[in-house]
Image: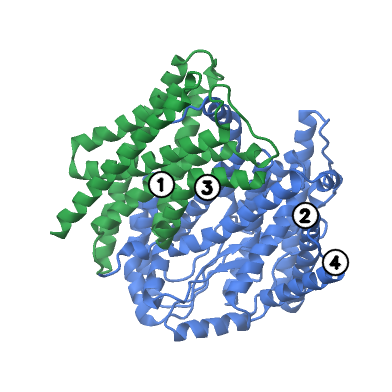
Amino acid sequence: MTVAAGIGYALLALGPSLSLFISVISKKPFLILTVLSSTLLWLMSLIVLAGVWRAFLPLKSTTWWPFAILILTSVSFQEGLRILFWKVYKRLEDILDAFADRLAKPRLFLTDKMLIALAGGLGHGVAHAVFFCLSLLTPAFGPATFFVDKCSQLPFFLVSAIIALAFVTIHTCSMVIAFNGYAEGNKVDQYFVPAVHLVAGMVTLVNFASGGCVVGIPLLYFMAILTLLHCGKMVWRRLSETRQ
Amino acid sequence: MQSSILDSIGVEIIGVMSPVSICMLLVVLIVYSLSSSNPFSAASAPPIRTAANLVYLESSSDSTSQKFEGALLNALVFVILIAVVTFFLVLLYYYNCTGFLKNYMRFSAFFVLGTMGGSIFLSMIQHFSIPVDSITCFILLFNFTIVGVMSLFSSGVPIFVRQGYMVALGIFVAAWFTKLPEWTTWALLVALALYDLVAVLAPGGPLKMLVELAQTRDEELPALVYEARPTVSQNGIVQGRSLDLLVGGVSDSRSVEMQAMSSNNVDQNENQNRANSGYTVIQDTNFGNMEGVQRRDEGGRSLSVDILHERHSSSSSSSEYSTVVGNRDSEIVVDEERSPLVGAPEMRNGGEQMRDGLENSDVSSRGIKLGLGDFVFYSVLVGRAAMYDLMTVYACYLAIISGLGCTLILLSVWRQALPALPISIALGVIFYFLTRLLMEPYIVGTATQLMMF
């Protein structure tokens, strides 16, 4: 029974990414490699951040502003990495195109580029879910569960799985939006992504208040759905443009 | 719509990575299910004494420096043991005792599958309370073992079965290694990575000698190796190309510690491959960049050009550089029973037949070969990480896989047998301790406050 609960939490957080992975990514080895390298990049960013913050940990759980600074620095560092990721991708794209020419195959289609962006985003999202939710799940397979004082309505594992799902969505979509924004030189999209990431991170601060998760989680899901809609709209627009 | 090149890039890398991932996943599951809640296995674990801790038996009450010295001594003794055994096997191979080697391999595979696999099955049956009577269990185990031995060394078995048994061997041995005490495990892993480096690359290293011997005799390496063969199901030509692409576009064999087997390819294919190889290499190096290896492009480019010329001049399409591999054998020398040592020459006939078959269907039959020892020690690292926390498991997995990727890229640049352990193990160990010491308090601290980003 507890094993079922543990698996349930894991699937709640990672189910959508899993189905995305199986249905889209796993058919193209190159995309798998992209997912892996983007996951690794995210892990390294976490390690660097943890190294910087190590001296100040553990933070006191009574004041909220150190957490705000922590989230602010972490988000800005990761958004910086996103730009780096884009630069690397850009070079990769040139090489892939040159290679395609050489093989007398078509260059990368628009859908291919979007798939690569999706894989990169999925890597970030999966890394988030794995490290923030899945790695804390071990006790959930045992005979008990765990509640946090500040959010006593739901078990901690369930809350973290729900939050992780929102972040997986945000990370996955925002990579697609960001790559497209960089490619088109669209300033709005370029600023949209860090803004969403930062706001989503800040919204989790609401959980700090006692019972805050009742408000915080809906707000977070509002951001996630906003990102999802924006991403969908943008992809639809791009695809219909190229079709004409 | 024409298929885009995305479909064909990376097939070979994934072909190597997926069995390694499966092996690690299963070892982690075994470690989890058997070690965490089973009082029997926990109780019986400490007293094991194997070749890997001959000198010093670690106990948790010892002081840190005592553990450290003891672990170093253990690792040293184990590596020396492996080196001696490997030299002995090279000697046997040198004097053409392939019959002996082959039977020895059969015996050790039988032994590993039967006893180690058997004991793992037993503890699983105990743990999950599976209702099986001993006779049924014995017959099943015996069948499993016999099929395994036959599939490893005979030709008529589908490659898929053989690959499955290689992974199974890796899992059993790795699961045994995880019973070693903690400090000894780490010292052992580092020592083996260093040994691997020396044995494969240094002149006079046993594995290098083995590879060169096999090369001059134009035989396959006598060893237990996992062979990632191209899947025949897809369109042959595309497949062949992508392989090259992937691993660096070389049309002959390369081995990362793995050896790629090149076969007598259809000429046409070969030519195309050659033309591609330049690009390929560059491409690979680019992946490298992504992973943090910077600035290899220039080098890669010129190198690849050289390679091209070389290729053209030497039109031998069937040179086999086999690789290294010996290692693994030795690594497998597990506990006192140095069981599966190495390799008996893989059946040439089998290979040949396979090749013929493949050639007929116009597919190039080269694949990357990865020594079984690499499987084992990757899994040992991950299994050891699993005893601490899930977070370290993920970090180590990513580190090892990316190390493997780096090795494959280097393979495509250098095109000679390479040791697969050093980069992966180094990254794995670094990431393990970084995660454990730095990342864990950070993540647990924020996540338990329900703060994420």
The answer to whether residue B325 is left or right of residue B449 is right
| Residue tagged 2 | B81
Disc 2 to disc 4, C-alpha distance: 40 Å
Q: Chain of mark 1?
A: A
Callouts 2 and 4 close, C-beta under 8 Å:
no
Identify the mark at residue B27; answer none if there is no mark: none
Q: Chain of mark 2?
A: B
Q: Nearer the viewer, residue A152 or B211?
A: A152
The answer to whether residue B196 is left or right of residue B452 is right
Q: Which numbered disc, 1 or 3, marks the residue that appears first in the sequence?
A: 3
| Residue tagged 4 | B133
**To which quarter of the image does residue B71 belong?**
top right
* Residues packed near mark 2 inside 10 Å, few (<14), some (14 to 19) or many (20 plus): some
**To which quarter of the image does residue A168 belong?**
top left
Outermost residue toward the top in this view: A63
* Residues packed near mark 3 inside 10 Å, few (<14), some (14 to 19) or many (20 plus): some
